[in-house]
Amino acid sequence: MYNILTITRKELRAYFDSPIAYIVVVAFLLVAGWMYFSSLFLMGRADLRTFFAPSPFSPSMLLVILAPAVTMRLIAEERRSGTIELLTTMPIRDSEVILGKFLAAFLLLLSALALTLVYAVSV
């Protein structure tokens, strides 16, 4: 468990030390807010049905694009920086590496979704 948390902390630090996390979260919030509030003002209804509607123009469908974009970076960054060899030769299991990287991506997406609670409060 310690190895998983160490990898998660490393990946979260890598996300937030570079502008990647900030750009992804702010872009998600801007597009989701625009989609949500434009439908809110056009329809004149104060509910969150349009936020969770399964249409291609709902903010929840942005996660279909956002989640793969965030997760594909994890291993690609290791290969690009040349640290994949170091990571694979360390005395940790592959499952711990995968779970640590998954948890970091999950926490980044969860933080983006947590910031959308402002929309629910505004309704």
Image (cartoon, rainbow, N blue to C red):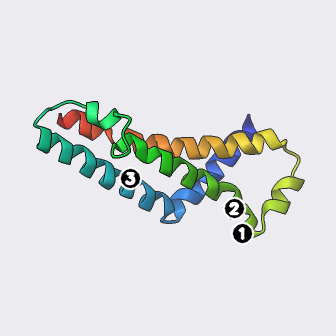
Residue nearest the viewer, comparing 30 with 14:
30
Amino acid residing under circle 3: Phe
Q: Which of marks 2 and 3 is nearer the N terminus?
A: 3
Residue 54 located left or right of residue 39: right
Amino acid residing under circle 2: Ala
Vertical placement of 5 versus 21: above or below? above
Whether tag 1 and tag 3 are in contact, CB under 8 A, the answer is no
Give the spatial CA distance, label 1 vs label 2. 6 Å
Q: Regarding mark 3 in the picture, which secondary structure is present there?
A: helix
| Residue sitting farthest toward the front | 55
Residue 58: x percent and y percent? 33, 42
Residue nearest the viewer, comparing 111 with 48:
48
The disc label shown at residue 80, or none: 1
Residue 20: x percent and y percent? 50, 62
From where the camera sits, is residue 12 visible?
no
Residue 112: x percent and y percent? 42, 46
Give the spatial CA distance, label 2 vs label 3. 22 Å
Q: Regarding mark 2 in the picture, which secondary structure is present there?
A: helix
The disc label shown at residue 76, or none: 2
Residue nearest the viewer, comparing 6 with 77:
77
Whether tag 1 and tag 2 are in contact, CB under 8 A, the answer is yes
Q: Say which residue appears at 37% left-offset and 57% top-offset.
A: 26
Location of the N terminus (image quadrant): top right
Q: Say which residue appears at 20% left-offset and 43% top-offset.
A: 39
Q: Say which residue appears at 87% left-offset and 52% top-offset.
A: 90
Q: Regarding mark 1 in the picture, which secondary structure is present there?
A: helix
Amino acid residing under circle 1: Arg
Give the spatial CA distance, label 1 vs label 3. 26 Å
Q: In which quarter of the image is residue 82?
A: bottom right
Residue 30 located left or right of residue 3: left
Residue 2: x percent and y percent? 73, 38
Q: Earlier in the sequence, mark 1 or mark 3?
A: 3
